Image (cartoon, coloured by chain):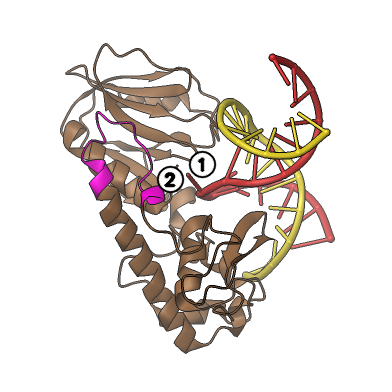
Chain colours: A brown, B yellow, C red
Amino acid sequence: MPELPEVETTRRGILPHIVEQRVKTLEVRQAKLRWPVPDSIHQVAGKKLLDVERRGKYLLFRFRNGTVIAHLGMSGSMRITAPDEPPGFHDHVDMVFSDGRRLRYCDPRRFGAWLWTEEEPTDHPLIASLGPEPLTEAFHATYLHGKSRGRKSSIKAFIMDSHIVVGVGNIYANEALFMAGIHPKRAAGKVSAARYEKLVQAIKQVLADAINMGGTTLRDFVGGDGKPGYFQQTLRVYGRANRPCRNCQTPLKEIRLGQRSTVFCKLCQT
DNA sequence: CCCTGAACCTGACCGC
DNA sequence: TGCGGTCAGGTTCAGG
């Protein structure tokens, strides 16, 4: 259920339980994920987990001589389980630590991934071509405006392209465009520098707020149900088709853009 | 290089 | 109750 805030929430939730712990084994009950889980991944056995990092929506489990690159896809989640808790039908992978605790990966749709690389993850093909992190200073209006020149695709598809900027999924693309007052179908190349300024601020704010909210649901994350945090926050447009715009009361419109549900206010967004 | 649509999968929900 | 269609938080890949 991951947008970037969920992935970051997951990272923060699992990290303190497993960092510095030694991996006993990796149990793969279902290897058919986005890509087949490679046999080489079993090299983690016996290694100490040094850190869990995040790049975009990828989670990077760092070991001395390699990295597990994991992705939650559309429906993936991770939690820490007790040694004796039996896996459910969609619990495809366990990273088992020497103290018996397990990092358990559940992913009904299997769009996620578990990969192993011995190169620096920044050099891995999936990671190397990614755009900047939205919550860093590397992501700013000048950058986005520059990248957009000459682009005819919609602004929504543009900001959801991980090669432009990582971590802006469908929900937050809708939200950020509403906050910035930009019509989702507008050509990316025709958005002014001033509006990119607003858009960048909106993206940063909506993601940062969601991470903070995720943090509140995170408190019982380990033992809890792993319910996504963003349904508990007040979304401005996503999931609110035909309901009144929070600015002007006009019923929000829903269209399909790149096979994705797109909700906006036809008066407030131009 | 840029853009669009298909593909990967399961489960929930809706209307008949 | 069952069946078919639609939709869901992502991302790569093929093809124009």
Alpha carbon distance from label 1 to label 2: 6 Å
**In this rendering, does residue A52 appear at all?**
no
| Residue in view at x 63 percent, y 81 percent | A150
Mark 1 residue crowding within 10 angstroms, few (<14) / some (14–19) / many (20+): some
Q: Position of residue A98 (x, y in %)?
A: 19, 18
Instruction: Give residue A152's quadrant in the image.
Output: bottom right
- Front residue of this view, candidates A187 and C4: C4
Q: Is residue A251 left or right of residue A106?
A: right
Q: Is residue A258 left or right of residue C9?
A: right
Highlighted range, magenta: A216-232
The quadrant of the image that shows the N terminus of chain A is top left
Q: Position of residue A102 (x, y in %)?
A: 27, 22
| Residue in view at x 37 percent, y 72 percent | A139
Q: Which residue is mark 1?
A: A74
Please say if A269 is above or below A35: below
Across the whole image, how many numbered discs are drawn on residues? Answer: 2
Identify the amino acid type marked 1.
Met
Identify the amino acid type marked 2.
Pro
| Residue in view at x 55 percent, y 34 percent | A35
- Front residue of this view, candidates A233 and A17: A233
Q: Which residue is mark 2?
A: A2
**Reading the chain from its start, which is encountered first: label 1 or label 2?**
2
- Front residue of this view, candidates A70 and A214: A214
- Judged from the image, the secondary structure of the residue bearing numbered disc 1 is loop
Q: Which mark is residue A268?
A: none
Mark 2 residue crowding within 10 angstroms, few (<14) / some (14–19) / many (20+): many
Q: Position of residue A133 (x, y in %)?
A: 37, 62
Contact between labelled residues 2 and 1, with CB atoms less than 8 Å apart: yes
The quadrant of the image that shows the C terminus of chain A is bottom right
